[in-house]
Amino acid sequence: MLADLFSNEDDPSQFLYIAYGVGTTAESTTYTALVNESDRALATLTQASTYTPSDTMRFQHLFSEATAGATVSEVGIFTASVGGTMLARKLLDPYITVTANGNILVTYDFIVKDGGHA
């Protein structure tokens, strides 16, 4: 079950953290961190259906102290609040500008499809 892979906060190998940053370097399978991370937090995880029932794990966090006007260009999923293992990194297109009140809702949908991720 997909939820079992992401549900145990006591297991240090679980991917439970979401981060955002301002790095603009192209995506690469060799990266182990965001290029220029701004902040990271424990994500709220929910299961969703994108292509087939329950094939998506949604990571989400409302960052409320982001720098207003900053341009967010990358997001990633990690096993720890600092360092840890990165599951995935996505370069945003288009980039997102943080609102004047400093709030940004970061969402990453990890989709398992046909034996891999999309």
Image (cartoon, rainbow, N blue to C red):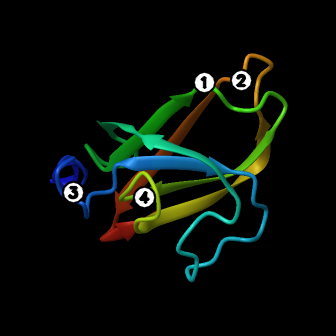
Q: Which of marks 3 and 1 is nearer the N terminus?
A: 3
Q: Position of residue 40 (x, y in %)?
A: 52, 46
| Cα distance between the residues tagged 2 and 3 | 32 Å
Relative side of 26 to 19, left or right: right
Establish if 27 lies above or below 55. Answer: below
Disc on the earlier residue, 2 or 1: 1
Residue tagged 4: 78
Of mark 2 and mark 3, the one earlier in the sequence is 3
Residue at mark 1: 64
| Picture residue at 76% right of the left edge, 32% below the top | 67
- Where 85 sits versus 104, above or below? below
**In the drawing, what numbered circle is on residue 102?**
2
Identify the disc placed on residue 5.
3
Mark 3 or mark 1, whichever is nearer to me: 1
Front-most of residues 30 and 10: 10
Which of the two labelled residues, at mark 3 and mark 4, occupies the earlier sequence position? 3
